[in-house]
Amino acid sequence: MGPIRGSKTKRKIDAETGFDWWDDFSKRIVGSLSPSKGVDEFELVFKVSRKTFNYICSLVSEPMMAKATNFVFLNGKSMSLNDQVALALRRLSSGDSLKGIANFFGTNHSTVSRVTWQFVVAIEERGLHHLQWPSTESEITQIKSKFENIRGLPNCCGVIHTTHIMMLLSESDHMVDVWLDRKDNHSMILQVIVDPDMRFRDVVTGYPGKMDDASVLQNSHFFDLSEKGKRLNGNKLKLSEGTEIQEYIVGDSGFPLLPWLITPYQGRKLPETKTEFNKRHFATRLVAQRALARLKDVWRMIHGVLWRPDKNRLPRVILACCILHNIVIDMEDDVLDDLSLTSQHDSGYRPEVCDMADKKASLSRDKLARYLSGRLPL
């Protein structure tokens, strides 16, 4: 009998998707699985599709395999690149302890720690192009269009937001009080600027949770570039004759009102024009809240309370999770569509009101509010 039609194609697909590796690996960790069930199990274990997993492997292959370290399982078998990437992804996505991951993979906790760190360094080295500010006019134009489609904000280029990465620190740590925030938790701040597809375009982390949003922003490279006119310096939008508005991002009341950063109006019993503006502003900001909720839901190592983390390494772990978040979006990976995700990312924290307001920015916001209410003629 001749070969069944399509068998060569199937073998080619299996080779490309790492089927043989997963077939062997899955038997070791969860017992024998049928091929159809294996696909679902793969995605549940690693939170990414096979296509995305293979792309990540190709991305980090050179820096990870260039290391002289020979990582092994408890049975003495050497870990392949796929094994190492699988271990690191499981560690970052499950939130399980080093011991739990070690038991799951059949290795020791020190190997889990070393492999994960080597992966974090490699994904930062080779994957940073997935996390960058738009570099072309067509790209920024598309972003503006998508934001305007949300609730009508024109010429908007991003949403800025922050979240806290919780930590449990030793009382013997002489720097312990530095990390104590206003909710009496030890935490590290993550500030992100998000596009309408929930992709992170700028990330700042490493600062203690006690710092307010305005201070973190003012210590960022993005702030320096924007203040110098080197960012958010694209085409201005004409609102009416003699009235135009520059490119900007939006943020909540914890941020200063600046020519390039528009915040909501404060106070109660606001005029209808300002109330309507705030509604549109809030609806637009939700994209950043959803992005951070998804980040923490999927990469659960930074979701809960990290037990005595290395505070020098933690910012790079956070950055790696942000890069992985973007890779999933860039790969058009639909695995997360089937996962149950929450809408909370910073429970118990509310923005502190920043009173800093640039006069020119205040006038621009008023003009934008009138334009959105239809009271500013075209």
Image (cartoon, grey):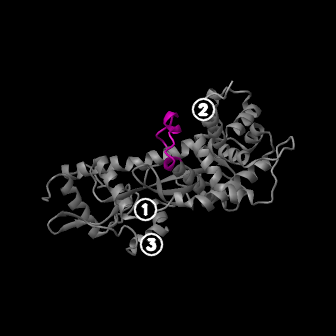
* Amino acid type for the residue under numbered disc 2: Gly
Where is the N terminus found, in terms of image quarters?
top right
Q: Which mark is residue 224?
A: 3
Label 2 environment density (alpha carbons within 10 Å; few <14, some 14–19, many ≥20): few
Label 1 environment density (alpha carbons within 10 Å; few <14, some 14–19, many ≥20): some
The local secondary structure at tag 1 comes to loop
Residue at the extreme top: 1
The residue at which mark 2 appears reads as 6
Q: How far is disc 2 from disc 3 in space, using C-alphas?
A: 57 Å
* Sooner in the amino-acid sequence: mark 1 or mark 2: 2
Are the residues flagged by discs 2 and 3 in contact, CB closer than 8 Å? no
The residue at which mark 1 appears reads as 134
Residue 334 position in % (x across, y down): 50, 39
Q: Residue at x 82, y 47 (%)?
A: 78
* Sooner in the amino-acid sequence: mark 1 or mark 3: 1
Q: Which is closer to the viewer, label 1 or label 3?
A: 1
Residue 306 position in % (x across, y down): 65, 48
On the question of residue 177 being in view, the answer is: yes
